[in-house]
Image (cartoon, coloured by chain):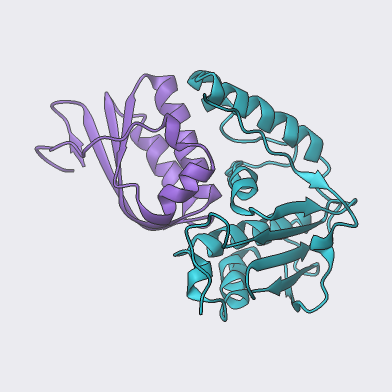
Chain colours: A purple, B cyan
Amino acid sequence: MMDTIHGWYTLEISGDLDLYSAPELLKKTLEILQQRITHFHIDCSRVHYLDSSGVGTIIKTLQAAKARGIKITFSGIQGTPRKVLSMANILPILTEATPPQVKQST
Amino acid sequence: MQQIIVRKLIVDEHNELFDAQGMRYIEFPSDYNRIREYTTYVLQDCPEAYKEGNLLEQQLSEIIKNGIKHGNKKDPSKKLKVWYDLRKRVRFIVEDEGEGFTNLEAWNEYYRKRQEALFREDFDTFLNLASYRGPNSDAEDGGNSLIAALEYWNGGMIYNNKKNKVGVVRWFTNGSSVGTPQ
């Protein structure tokens, strides 16, 4: 979803973020970060499985957002995905926030 | 007072974690597309309490992936050998036919720098170091599986001398949030 007025883009991801799906998600997030946005929000509330490839996608997305000066936030990180991010020591560099209320989706 | 925690990957050929006596055994062809299937097979009789949701599946899957992808280079003619014991705790020995994790010491050094950056809250450096990139890393590697593994395998994570075989164990007592199944 994209709020073209305020420069927000919200991406909802669901299911298993694993070695098979992570490359496709990375491609998607890097495409999003090429757009004229100021804030990228990723809603993880429907992610139930996360492995190191998924964590790697999150890290690469964070790095790309930082390089482009785009603020990135997350919500809904829970269950074992949260535990995996904690064990990988990635949680301290994630900014968690409630999902933005967007006006329209594309 | 905040403490810095820097764990290390250890090589110990004769460690008791390599004693496979009484363990079940299975071997798989190195089919990258079946890694999660292999993991599910090994854990099919595992007590639910030991699975911790899908955390055990995730951690075992990482070890199997490392053996198939980095060890056996996805060569289906090469086998991945898995010994496992799911009684009282979860213990695995996984051996591939590759040349071994030759960058183990470099990885330990990388991890030390990463943890030091986190400790001093230097998040820019930490973000740059968040994923390990070795000479055999590719674009699809997460580069963080061993970091979580060192915490998850609370009874040890040991490599043999060739570094193509790893022994791991996770206990569920003495502070674990998971009780022993009845």
Q: Give the number of callouts.
A: 0
Nearer the observer, A24 or B64: B64
Residue B70 seen in this snapshot: no
Q: Residue B104 in the image: x percent, y percent? A: 79, 40
Q: Which quadrant of the structure image shows residue B108?
A: top right
- Vertical side of B38 occupied by A27: above or below: above
Q: Residue B111 in the image: x percent, y percent? A: 67, 33
Q: Residue A38 in the image: x percent, y percent? A: 27, 23
Left or right of B137, for residue A58: left
Nearer the observer, A4 or B173: B173
Nearer the observer, B103 or A6: B103
- Residue drawn at x 83%, y 76% is B21
Residue A44 seen in this snapshot: yes
- Residue drawn at x 47%, y 44% is A85
Left or right of B29, for residue A52: left
- Residue drawn at x 73%, y 36% is B107
Q: Residue B86 in the image: x percent, y percent? A: 64, 74
